[in-house]
Each structure stands twice: as structure tokens, then as C-alpha cells.
Image (spheres, helix red, strand yellow):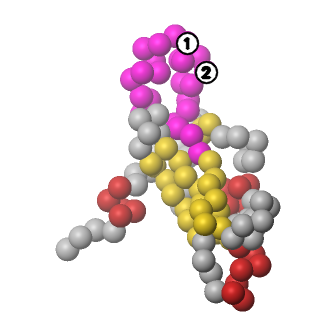
Amino acid sequence: MSFPFYTNQVHLPDDSIPTKIPLDPKFWSFFKDAVGAIDGSHIHASPHAFERGPYRNRKGFISQNCLFACDFGLNFTYALTSWEGSATDAHVYEAAEGHDLHIPVGKYFLADAGFPL
């Protein structure tokens, strides 16, 4: 029996801090509570013709908006796929947070301005 890719390769973040951060004073003061980085990515999609409207993103091509998070070792810790390309990063993030993205108390992900505080 083979396990699905997600349960085998993706692991949710924990409270651990990568050893590189506490050992370097340049990093420690800024990243001591960070668990990784999170961002959205538009991946080309091919929905049925009658479904293409919502999948057209702000740049004009048909895509799905996917949310990915990784730790400081560049390992994926979270993935949420299949949102329409017209969905904003903030909307996808809020859906993930309400569903199964759990950030440990007192910790945070580094993100760009497309995500709510």
C-alpha cells in the first residue's frame, strides 16, 4: 500500500527553531519566532470551457491559486491547491486557516503584503 503524496511528504510546522537561527545573532533577533515562509503561486490550469471565468487571474491567464508554506530547510510544510485563479492570496489563506493550517501560538510565517496580519 502506498501513501498519498501529501501525507507522506508534507508535514505541518511545529515549535522547533532551525539551528542556524539561534546560532547567528544576525538572524536570532528577527526570526526567533518564525516557522517558515508562506506564499501563493498561480499554476496554469485547464478547466472546462464553462468553468474558465473564475479561473482567469488578474494577469489574464487561466490558473489555479495555490498556497504553499516551507520551513527554513526549504521543506514544504503546507500546501493548499485548486482555488480559482481569481481568488486573492488573502482569501485562500483565510480558507486554509479555517480548515487545517494551524500556526503554533506565538509563532508566525514570513509573508508578503498579500496576506492578512
Provide the residue span drawn in magenta.
14-38
Q: Secondary structure at mark 2?
A: helix
Q: Quadrant of residue 1?
A: bottom left
For residue 27, above or below residue 88 = above
Q: Position of residue 17 (x, y in %)?
A: 44, 29
Residue that appears at 59% across and 62% down: 43
Proximity of marks 1 and 2: CB atoms separated by less than 8 Å? yes
State the residue position of label 1. 26
Amino acid at dot 2: Phe
Q: Is residue 94 visible?
A: no
Residue that appears at 72% across and 47% down: 115
Left or right placement of residue 96 versus residue 72 in this view: right
Q: Residues within 10 Å of mark 1 (few under 14, many from 20)?
A: few
In magenta segment, residue 34:
yes
Amino acid at dot 1: Lys
Q: In the drawing, what numbered circle is on residue 46?
A: none
Image quarter (top left, top right, bottom left or bottom right) of the C terminus:
top right
Q: In the drawing, what numbered circle is on residue 30?
A: 2
